[in-house]
Image (cartoon, rainbow, N blue to C red):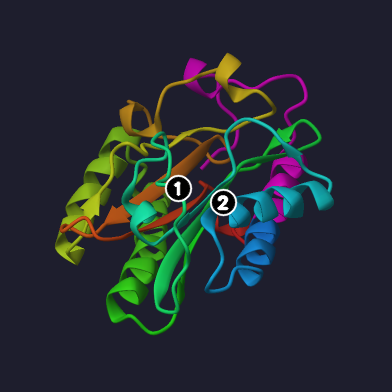
Amino acid sequence: MSSFTTHAAECVGPTFSVDGMLLARQKTRQAITNIANRITPGMLEEDAVAMAKQVQVDAGMALSWHPTRVRFGRNTIKPMKIKSEPGVILQNNDIFFIDIAPRVNTWEGDGGASFVVGENADYLRCTKDAESLFHDVRKIWSTQHLTGQALYEYAELTAKKMGWELNFDLPGHRISDFPHATKYSGSLADLEITPSAMRWILEIHLRDPQQRFGAFYEDMLLDDKDYT
């Protein structure tokens, strides 16, 4: 798929750079790993958020265009725009996810992933399925060239087959040189064209049908050759 387009929903600014966007992605994914490695049972969610912010700052990234989020346990079912219940502590057998959107120079990063402490089989399956569904949808995008709308229709159907609910409050969005919102603010799930590489973030938030927990995974839509 081409990385270049003239569609209004996919325009970029003068500082857009393929290498810059890939650098922002690489640093974002590394920060997620570094944050996850510092989270342990007994930690307060608010303290984990503060730590996550500091990890990004220490790596030379700016905290830019959406809040840094770390969500523990029952807070993992909440839509991102809803604040966490305060005072939640990570337990010995628990689930959590990280959602960060740092800026590297003028380029936006955005990434999220879920993690499990302990051996809860349902948590482990939900976490694995969120990442697996992300890659499944990405493969469909790469091979069948579906519209953004069709990609999320596929994601919803597949999530149900897996035994989960797909949270449509997280419908994917643009990414670009900062700020992408001045170029396009609509969602990937509403996009009526085939999304181009390096323009969109695909978000997958799976929730337990009984609303006990959820798992989240997001990353940039990229061709296989760039997905390292």
Q: Residue at x 33, y 33 (%)?
A: 189
Of residues 219 and 78, the one nearer the viewer is 78
| Image position, residue 63 (x, y; %) | 70, 37
Which of the two residues, 127 or 162, is positioned nearer the viewer here? 127
Residue tagged by mark 2? 46
Choose between 214 and 137: the one closer to the eye.
214
Q: Is residue 73 left or right of residue 181?
A: left
Q: Single out the residue that lies furthest toward the bottom.
A: 119
Is 7 magenta? The answer is yes
* Precedes in sequence: disc 2 or disc 1: 2
State which quadrant residue 39 falls in: bottom right
The residue range painted magenta reads 1-28
The quadrant of the picture occupied by the C terminus is bottom right
Instruction: Measure how far apart labels 2 and 1 are at the Cα level.
Output: 8 Å
Q: Give how far across and how far down residue 132 sits, in percent.
A: 38, 65
Badge count: 2
Q: Nearer the viewer, residue 204 or 169?
A: 169
Label 2 packing within 10 angstroms: few (<14), some (14-19), many (20+): some
* Cβ atoms at labels 2 and 1 below 8 Å apart: yes
Residue 59 visible? The answer is no
Amino acid under label 1?
Pro
Residue 125 percent coordinates (x, y)? 31, 74
**Residue 155 part of the magenta segment:** no
Q: Residue 11, relative to residue 3: is it above or below?
A: above
